[in-house]
Amino acid sequence: MPYKLSATLAGHASDVRAVVSPRDDLILSASRDSTAISWTRAHPSAPFAQTTVLRPGQRYVNSLAYIPPSPDAPEGYVVTGTQDGLINVFSLASGRSDPSFTLIGHSHNVSALHALPDGTIISGSWDKTARVWKNFQELWELSGHEQAVWAVLALSPDQFLTGAADNAIKLWHSRKNVRTYTGHTQPVRGLVQLPDIGFASCANDSEIRVWTLEGDLVYSLTGHTSFVYSIVLLPNGDLASSGEDRTLRIWKDGECVQTVVHPAISVWAVSATPNGDIVTGASDGHVRVFSAVEERWASSEDLKAYEDSVANSALPVQQVGDVKKSDLPAEDALLQPGKKEGEVKMIRKGDLVEAHQWNSASMSWQKIGDVVDAVGSGRKQLYQGREYDYVFDVDVQEGVPPLKLPYNANENPFSAAQRFLQVNELPLSYLDEVVKFIEKNTAGVNISNTGNNYVDPFTGASRYQPAQNSNASGGAEYMDPFTGASRYRAQPSAPVPPVSAPAPVASNDPWTGGSRYSGSAAPTSPPQSVSPTGKLPVTAVQSFKQANIPPMRNKLFQFNQDIQNEISTAPLAMYPDERSLIDDAFLYLQQAVSGSSPNTAPPFTREDIEAILSLLERWPMGSRFPLIDLCRLVIAYCNDAYSEPAFRQQFFNTLFNAVEWSDSWGSPMDRSRETNILLLLRGLVNAFQDNTTLDDSGWVYQIVQRLEEASYAVLSKSARVALGTLFFNLSCVSLRQRLDPELRSRHLSLILQSLQSETSDSEPAYRLLVALGNTAYAARQQSQPLEPAQAAWAKEIVAAASRSFGEERVQSMAREIVSLL
């Protein structure tokens, strides 16, 4: 008989992250609503009812285990693992709300628990360790994983398995790691013992693997289309698994024999009762029981309601693949049987697209949802390497850059809000305001019933309605949940006073929102070698060498922690050797920036740079800016570490790729990319200093060639100032060293093109004019006249700049340039 819904247990107000069902009459569940609930029934035909609500603390309860009855606990113990790193043990018989024991040792979220009948407990944590507890005291710490431990399994009182976000599974005898199993390509999420075989594992790579303890892979089970979160052995020897693809799947003899779709996004947990029923916990806050015994099935009305809730789910087109309606078959395509359990077929029904899934047990197609088009602006938006329907700017404090709030229309708003608060270390008291903000400003619908009588499972309220003018692409105004203000808009850059030579403009600091990067002081007297008018050439190169190292380091390691704690990005986090190298780099640069002499830190080497470049190549776009700013200082203070010609070109090429330089230059530019490009340009300014030599000019050609790809008009004012300073610094180098004709021509063309595009801000225009003046001066002094066409073009551009900007410094510089052309 197929599995069908037996009962729905509604009591949690948020995602049910763990379920345990040790007896036919007892179910335990843990939730992100900070509670664990015990559900019991008086006899097999009675419904389950809440017996006890446990409140281990104010943070998420993410893991759960059960210890059978003992003299001290005649109903057994419930073990809960929470986000604050605590493990609390409650006696079910006591009825007390406070724990009988609290196990302290982990420093981060306790993500996994398992217990043996003798009371041995193993726990796994985001702190990269697993711990074994005996008699409610820590017995062993199991250290060896490089990332968060997501799955644990006690095989015996002294033999354990652990699975982690480093994609590895480890076997331990007591505290010793005796074997490591590799094969999964993404974080391991679940483990279950298989008698006479070994064990099975599931992972974010959508795969279930069956292993012997000796390390042999017996076979793999494929069918899930997203992360597989949990796996359990059924009493009859079959397996059941659940995951991010909304499904519970039952496996027999290596094949998926049934797929049970849930009206939720994530099916976080699965367990089995001794009588063979299956219990699931899902992101809609519900615990569900499924049975293969007809007598235990829910009423026909409840079964129909459940099927309708699944059928009326809204599936974003991205979840099932791109849809071209004209190519889809009509409804009669459902007359043909499916080829395998879980096969999905989309059909055209009038103007609608429906998704149906083949159910082998009933030999029929089951509707699993209506396919809706992309939401928001009609296109997914990229944030930290992942696609979202919306990426909002949230202004949390005046003068501080806005925070990014990514959200998908098929997400639980509470989960998205909680993730946002955690990542940005904001108080959970903001939770309701952020949820309201998401609901007010999204035009998509969550996976749920599409009728008007829907009741939100998290708040009890009816469905939120999208704002009439909301627009994920940024065209609409919306209220910020923290300040009540409308959409964040970039503040104008601070005005820069006129100077006799270009001086870097102050700008909003990406770490604090305050001003930084004041640059070198402008010369207060004319240089020694001057033209007849006394201004050109200007020989004092500028730099962006200032830095506040501690917050830079803190931000970089905070991002690393965030990447490590996010399921999908955990494999991208720093490796231990990279962390050590980057720590050494910060130590060296701290002394270099402060001017300490001698620098007593370990020497800065190519290996340090390679560690930075490796992170730049794999970290999400939104997390790269501290790495790019670190490279700005490397360029300024560590030239010898990347002086080898081929490596120098690799270094700069990686930097350009890290800011997605060759991507489309459409406007408006993504804020993360805008910040990264600004920091890159400031780093390139530091590449052209008084000690710069052009003996090997390949890297200079490389930079000039990449700069030719940019769209000047799209750059922010701060970036245009940095670009003008870069061209000015190269012109200073050209005063001391003759540029070959092609390099000079391309440099001059970039100056003129930029100056032609600059019609609004005098500061970048002035820097470009000085760069042009230096270039014209060098041409005369070196008896290497400009090409007639370029000289004529330069005169036109200078005349236009003189008309656009009335400042005396611009007028004076323009007159002198014309006299040199």
Image: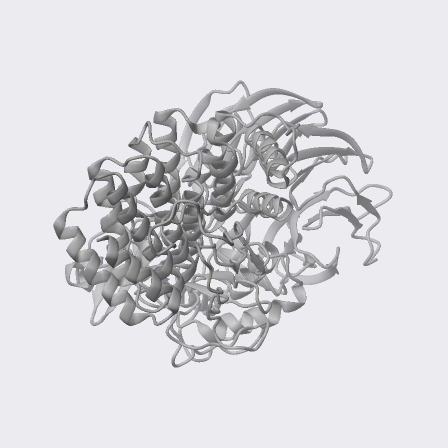
Residue 93, image x, y percentages:
82, 53
Q: Could you say which is closer to the camera, residue 210 or residue 501?
A: 501
Above or below residue 445? Residue 743 is above
Q: Residue furthest right?
A: 72
Q: Quadrant of residue 129?
A: top right
Residue 604, image x, y percentages:
55, 28
Q: Is residue 59 left or right of residue 90?
A: left
Q: Quadrant of residue 793?
A: bottom left
Above or below residue 559? Residue 303 is below
Q: Residue furthest left?
A: 789
Q: Is residue 670 left or right of residue 44?
A: left
Above or below residue 589? Residue 143 is above
Q: Is residue 196 visible?
A: yes
Q: Is residue 312 visible?
A: no
Residue at image position (20%, 38%) is: 741
Q: How many marks?
A: 0
Residue 591, image x, y percentages:
64, 36
Residue at image position (20%, 71%) is: 350
Residue 315, image x, y percentages:
36, 62
Q: Could you say which is closer to the camera, residue 805 or residue 308?
A: 805
Q: How is the image coloured?
A: one colour
Above or below residue 455? Residue 654 is above
Residue at image position (48%, 67%) is: 495
Q: Is residue 729 left or right of residue 21?
A: left
Q: Residue furthest front?
A: 532
Residue at image position (23%, 61%) is: 797
